[in-house]
Image (spheres, grey):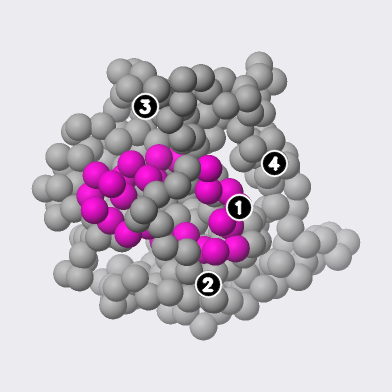
């Protein structure tokens, strides 16, 4: 029996003798099935050819990303707090070195994930560290593998620890979530945004999409809602889903200006 992982998105499926016929997450229009077709690997096979690389961004904030790249190739973040550590987003590979490093940093108390494309092996991470797994209830249909650690939350915000708050922004998925960390940036605050708010290559703009690989935009009302939802929150930095995606200053101004320009273009104002 094997826990099979989709090689396109990294999602883990329940133990079985053979892989599933298809990955519903990749069949959805927000993701894609590769032109070469659906393919699968196992957790053990993934660990044989890949490892995880770590980076410290600022005091108490580390990112981890698999190399060589696997599936979507997002990074996850570990927030080290006095009230217990938080894993933001998730990656498929959980190897022995990663387990040892995380335990050395104090383990993980809570896991929160921005949207279903990054669910990957969240069940394994929760089991390894005895963590509670927080997902927004609006995205419950995309959970492909059960876990006793799972807690579905509803509403617009959820405080995981003092100063660490989940915010439902919607957009890419109905339950699309970002994490506000008030203590980051020496108290100026940071937004861990996944790709619910996508930091662009120049790090002076962000963008919003229904489907990134298929380049399908969000409607204007959804973009306005994201901007309005984030407007009351104080933060300076934005940490995105992929390496190098960091806004280091004026995060709220960049979100507001980017959202306004996005809506202008949807309205035909070049």
Q: Earlier in the sequence, mark 2 or mark 4?
A: 4
Q: Does the magenta stretch include residue 128?
A: yes
Q: Residue 28 carries which label?
A: 4
**Circle 4 residues within 10 Å: few <14, some 14–19, many ≥20:** few
The nearer-to-camera label among 2 and 4 is 2
Residue displayed at 28% across by 46% down: 127
In the displayed structure, 83 sits above or below 77; it is below
Name the spot of residue 56 as percent of width and height, x first: 24, 49
Q: Where is residue 79 in the image (x, y as percent from the top left)?
A: 27, 59
Q: Is residue 204 visible?
A: yes
The quadrant in which the N terminus is found is top left
Q: Residue at x 30, y 68 (%)?
A: 184
Is there a contact, CB below 8 Å, between mark 1 and mark 2? Answer: no
Q: Are marks 3 and 4 in contact (CB under 8 Å)?
A: no
Q: Establish if 149 lies above or below 220.
A: above
How far across and how far down the image is residue 173, in percent? 63, 57
Q: Which tag is nearer the camera, tag 1 or tag 4?
A: 1
The residue singled out by tag 3 in the image is: 43
User: Which of the marked residues, 3 or 2, is nearer the chain's N terminus?
Assistant: 3
Mark 1 crowd level (few <14, some 14–19, many ≥20, 10 Å Cα): few
How far apart marks 3 and 2 lie (CA) works out to 31 Å
| Dot 3 or dot 4, earlier in sequence | 4
Q: Do the residues under discs 3 and 1 have CB atoms within 8 angstroms?
A: no
Mark 1 sits on what residue? 141
């Amino acid at each position: 029996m094997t826990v099979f992982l989709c090689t396109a998105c990294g999602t883990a499926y329940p133990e079985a003798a053979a892989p599933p016929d298809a990955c519903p997450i990749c069949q959805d229009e927000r993701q894609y099935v590769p032109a070469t077709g659906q393919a699968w690997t196992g957790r053990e096979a993934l660990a044989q050819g890949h490892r995880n690389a770590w980076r410290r961004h600022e005091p108490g904030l580390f990112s981890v990303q698999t190399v060589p790249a696997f599936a979507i190739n997002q990074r996850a973040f570990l927030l080290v707090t006095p009230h217990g550590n938080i894993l933001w987003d998730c990656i498929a590979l959980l190897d022995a070195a990663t387990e040892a490093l995380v335990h050395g940093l104090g383990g993980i108390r809570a896991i929160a994930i921005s949207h279903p494309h990054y669910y990957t092996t969240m069940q394994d991470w929760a089991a390894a560290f005895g963590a509670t797994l927080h997902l927004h209830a609006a995205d419950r249909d995309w959970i492909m593998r059960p876990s006793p650690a799972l807690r579905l939350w509803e509403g617009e915000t959820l405080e995981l620890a003092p100063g660490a708050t989940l915010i439902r922004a919607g957009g890419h998925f109905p339950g699309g979530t970002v994490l506000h960390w008030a203590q980051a940036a020496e108290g100026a605050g940071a937004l861990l945004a996944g790709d619910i708010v996508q930091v662009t290559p120049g790090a002076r703009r962000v963008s919003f999409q229904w489907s990134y690989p298929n380049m399908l935009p969000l409607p204007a009302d959804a973009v306005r809602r994201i901007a309005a939802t984030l407007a009351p929150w104080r933060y300076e930095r934005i940490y995105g889903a992929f390496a190098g995606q960091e806004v280091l200053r004026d995060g709220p101004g960049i979100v507001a200006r980017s959202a306004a320009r996005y809506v202008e273009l949807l309205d035909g104002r070049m």
